[in-house]
Amino acid sequence: MNYPLPMADFRILVVEDDADAAEMTSQVLRDEGYTVDVAVTVDAYEEPKKQDKPTRITMTIHVGIKPT
């Protein structure tokens, strides 16, 4: 694949409330050469997003959604 930036320049934010899934996802991405940050809640997600400006974000669709 042809990327505009080297993989190491991509900062990926993984937002995942399941600690095991977050660890597995972030490890796979790191093994591929990406810089990865992990947030386990929507609140934790907001701070890294503002400070580190990730290039890509992956998120569990149900993070932060409260059951009705």
Image (tube, rainbow, N blue to C red):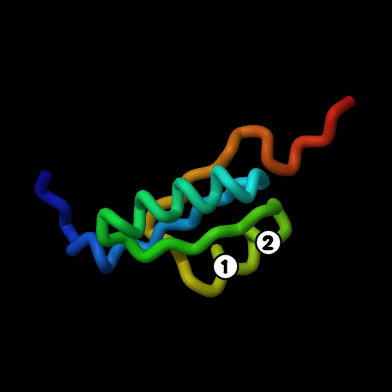
Q: Which three-letter amino acid code belongs to the residue tagged 2?
A: Ala
Q: Amino acid at mark 1?
A: Pro
Pointer 2 residue: 44
Residue sticking out furthest to the left? 2
The percent coordinates of residue 43 (x first, y second) are 72, 58
40 or 9, which lies in front?
Answer: 40
Badge 2: residue crowd in 10 Å (few <14, some 14–19, many ≥20):
few
Seen at 36% across and 65% down, the residue is 35
Where on the picture, by quarter, is residue 36? bottom left
Q: Quadrant of the C terminus?
A: top right
**Residue located at (49% from left, 63% from top):** 37
- In the image, is residue 1 above or below residue 26? above
Number of the label disc, if any, that sits on residue 36 = none
Residue position marked by numbered label 1 in the rendering: 48
Mark 1 secondary-structure assignment:
helix
Farthest residue in the top direction? Answer: 68
Mark 1 is surrounded, within 10 Å at the Cα level, by few (under 14), some (14 to 19) or many (20 or more) other residues, namely: some
Q: Quadrant of residue 48?
A: bottom right
- Tag 1–tag 2 contact (CB < 8 Å): yes
Q: Position of residue 49 (x, y in %)?
A: 55, 63
| Image quadrant where one finds the N terminus | top left
Considering every residue shown, the one lying at the far right of the view is 68
Quick one: 15 or 47, which is closer to the camera?
Answer: 15
